[in-house]
Image: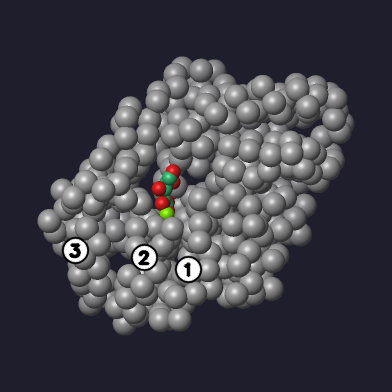
Amino acid sequence: MKIVSAKVIVTCPGRNFVTLKIQTDQGIYGIGDATLNGRELSVVSYLQDHVIPCLIGRDAHQIEDIWQYLYRGAYWRRGPVTMSAIAAVDTALWDIKAKAANMPLYQLLGGRSREGVLVYGHANGKDIAETVDEVGKYIDMGYKAIRAQSGVPGLASTYGVAGDKMFYEPADAALPTENVWSTPKYLTHTPKLFEKLRDTYGDGHEFLHDVHHRLTPIEAARLGKSLEPYRLFWMEDAVPGENQEAFRIVRQHTVTPIAIGEVFNTIWDAKTLIQEHLIDYIRTTVVHAGGITHLRRIADFAALHHVRTGSHGATDLSPVCMGAALHFDIWVPNFGIQEYMRHTEETDAVFPHDYKFENGYLIPGDTPGHGVDIDEELAAKYEYKPAYLPVNRLEDGTLWHW
Ligand SMILES: O=C(O)C(=O)C[C@H](O)[C@H](O)CO
Ligand SMILES: [Mg+2]
């Protein structure tokens, strides 16, 4: 089955998405997500100018060979742009193979390992009281796991805390918004939030928290320790991930489970973290870590070291990524949890899909392929709009992590 054409579709139904569509000589097509938040057009160019010309005429069934061809063959390995482009090709090819087999994608991976994919939603509020109320709304919707973020007293705005509660969009401005950050204020405040959540809702739900890479290792160790009485499912991105060895310090001091990986692109970003048992959950996902082919490699390596998966699933990962991720999640033996930030109605209309939310779980459908399509006519109505993620500064103006 030969690849005869491929095109990149950019659309902005409330936020930007980049989608690759690969067409074969047998009339079967596949799609893959290529969205890299705030840097979307660099992946568009990488695909259009450098990848698509190399795909034409290749056998769409040779997924592994094409992956190696694009990874090794480029000479310049890794990085978010390269790996998002490879992921888009890989996802589209798995979609094609599953459609050709007339099976849902999870059947090709090894079949279902579970009935549904446990997901966590995002609750956030300007203060503890509002966050506790928002968590209650997620519990009422049936969520069993909820990420909680709260505004910090004395800080005007904090990433993760939004006006629109259900459809929070971090890439919120044509140029980066500037937030102010104070580690001492945050470290004093955050344990109080989780104390209140456990007091209010008891022990029946999982609570998660995202630190956004803002702490040093010893500060992260302190936070993890202070959160221990509230039994978090995980503490996410506590320190920047580049220095994997730094996690040894966090690990030595706390039994709060540790998660990281949404900014990782390959197994090499997580190798030390996994083999030294420094983390509990690896959060790489389909679109930013080389597609299903590479994610499977990471998950298998993680399984050897008791590390489970917890794929990133914010709104900037399109429904195409979510669909593919759910087929992966329903199969992967060492599954942990899947993040699920709901897309808007406009986005869902552009990307018709067959997955559904039921009682705290997402269930992939049985449509052949990954079960997500793109309505190209509708997509064309939403023109690309530049949008950036915010930046973070300390109170004295120093640029900080976010
Ligand atoms: O969903 C999360 O855990 C995030 O941290 C959201 C990210 O900031 C967002 O997806 C960046 O593009
Ligand atoms: Mg995160």
Give the left or right position of residue 248, taking residue 332 as reference: left
Say what secondary structure mark 1 lies in.
Answer: helix
Which residue matches tag 2? Answer: 216
Q: Residue at x 18, y 51 (%)?
A: 395
List x then y, in percent, for residue 402.
Answer: 35, 50
Q: Residue at x 43, y 69 (%)?
A: 234
| Location of residue 43 with respect to 132 vertically, above or below | above
* Amino acid found under the numbered disc labelled 1: Ala
| Location of residue 195 with respect to 75 vertically, above or below | below
Residue in front for this viewpoint, 27 or 168: 168
List x then y, in percent, for residue 309.
Answer: 57, 63
Which residue matches tag 1? Answer: 246
Whether residue 379 is visible, yes or no, is: yes
Residue 146: quadrant of the picture = bottom left
Q: Quadrant of the N terminus?
A: top right
Whether residue 27 is visible, yes or no, is: no
Q: Decide if ligand 1 comes within 8 Å of the CB at mark 3.
A: no
